[in-house]
Amino acid sequence: MTDTPLYTMVNGEPMISTEAVALLMGIPYERLRAEIDRQKAENPESETFKLPRAWTRQGNRIRKETQAALGYEAGMKECIDYLAAKAERKAGGES
């Protein structure tokens, strides 16, 4: 991942980075970036990115698991923060 923020607030709404989407979907950043590039090359005029159905299902599962771990129905930003901290711990060798 890069050192860019996972989300920023614009007019009170969170704008999430590609890295945050990868965390939420449980896929490697590079795989997400490749799919974005593939779709853009396939249809250069379109600004719409369509998540593969399997990624959406996996993202829903991850959201439910994250909310269960937190013990409440967390919002997107809280889920991103939790998943980022979990990924950091994993990268640092902790369980």
Image: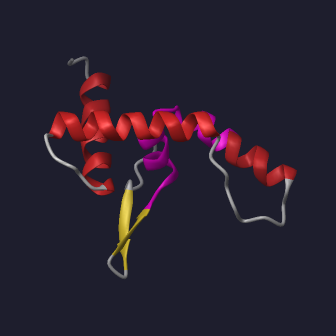
Q: Is residue 20 magenta?
A: yes
Depth order, front residue of 47/29:
47
Q: Quick one: quadrant of the C terminus?
A: top left
Q: Quadrant of residue 34?
A: top right
Identity of the residue drawn at 16% across and 46% down: 72
Left or right placement of residue 88 versus residue 22 in this view:
left
Identity of the residue drawn at 62% across and 46% down: 51
Left or right placement of residue 74 versus residue 33 in this view:
left
Q: Main secondary structure of the magenta part?
A: helix
Depth order, front residue of 35/93:
35
Note whether 9 is above or below 71 in the view shown. below
Residue 19 locus on image (x, y percent) = 47, 46
Identity of the residue drawn at 84% across and 66% down: 45
Q: Quadrant of residue 62?
A: top left
Left or right placement of residue 50 versus residue 84 in this view:
right
Residue 47 locus on image (x, y percent) = 72, 65
Q: Residue furthest bottom?
A: 11
Residue interval drawn in magenta: 16-34
Residue 20 locus on image (x, y percent) = 43, 48
Identity of the residue drawn at 22% across and 50% down: 73
Q: Quadrant of residue 2?
A: top left
Depth order, front residue of 41/5:
41
Note whether 8 is above or below 90 in the view shown. below
